[in-house]
Image (cartoon, helix red, strand yellow):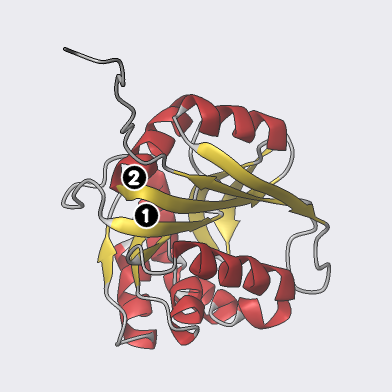
Amino acid sequence: MNEDVRSGYDRVAGEYAEHFRDELEGKPFDRKMLDWLAEKVGGLGVICDMGCGPGQVARYLSDQGARVCGVDLSPGMVERAQRLHPGIPFRRGDMLALSGVADNSYGGVAAFYSIIHVPRTALPQALEELKRVLCPGGVLLLAFHIGREVIHRDEWWGKEVSLDFIFFETEEMKDRLKVAGFELQEVIERDPYPAVEYPSRRAYLFARKPPPDTSFDTAPRR
């Protein structure tokens, strides 16, 4: 699966960057969600744009004053993100196994549609890895298309690919996050902006990595 995703996005990296690099200009709701993420994270640490593509989410957060970085499976996407936003660090990484990223590295993660190529069978692994790299109290913003369908593409912008675009139900994702050990904070849905994006209903879930359990037995010992 990951090899198909990596090679597919490498092939369309130029066209994808041209099409999506300024997409947030037409999505005021998404900007508001990112503003809220930055507010929630505050001084906890760096916010990682996970599945960053050409880095438009990282750039927006950086413009709001947040400390940011970006991770993407596709080297082609990472190269374009670095070229477009030279002041932001981007690196290649697989969200199913973020080798080289230490535990508790990030104050926040913006996962904007970065799970749309993760099969349901691998979703627990992805969520566990996102939780691992968040610091205690860190915040995940997870955005995805709502539904049950899987849309397959063999061609994208005239290039041969093999990509499955996977939709998830909101209740399903809430349950998955809870099982992974996240604390749900907010769950928001919106209708699409038909002029600027695929016509699917969208979900935005804020979830927190719980801080360590510091409770202790207060019974007298002597």
Residue at screen point 82% across, 73% down = 195
Give the left or right position of residue 112, taking residue 214 as reference.
right
Q: Position of residue 103 (x, y in %)?
A: 22, 46
Residue at screen point 19% across, 13% down = 221
Q: Position of residue 11 (x, y in %)?
A: 41, 64
Is any atom of residue 200 visible in this view? no
Q: CA distance from mark 2 to mark 1?
A: 6 Å
Q: Which mark is residue 166?
A: none
- Number of numbered discs on residues: 2
Residue at screen point 81% across, 68% down = 193
Crowding at label 2, few (<14), some or many (≥20) Cα neighbours within 10 Å? few
Q: Is residue 12 above or below residue 220?
A: below
Q: Nearer the viewer, residue 205 or 80?
A: 205
Q: Is residue 77 above or below residue 168?
A: below
The reply to whether dot 2 and dot 1 touch (C-beta < 8 Å) is yes
* Dot 1 amino acid type: Ser
Q: Secondary structure at mark 2?
A: helix
Mark 2 — residue?
A: 3
Q: Position of residue 85 (x, y in %)?
A: 37, 85
Work out which quarter of the rendered image holds the N terminus and state it: top left
Give the left or right position of residue 182, taking residue 103 as reference.
right
* Dot 2 amino acid type: Glu
Mark 1 — residue?
A: 7
Work out which quarter of the rendered image holds the C terminus and state it: top left
Is any atom of residue 107 visible in this view? yes
Residue at screen point 30% across, 48% down = 133
Q: Position of residue 84 (x, y in %)?
A: 39, 86
Q: Nearer the viewer, residue 196 or 31?
A: 31
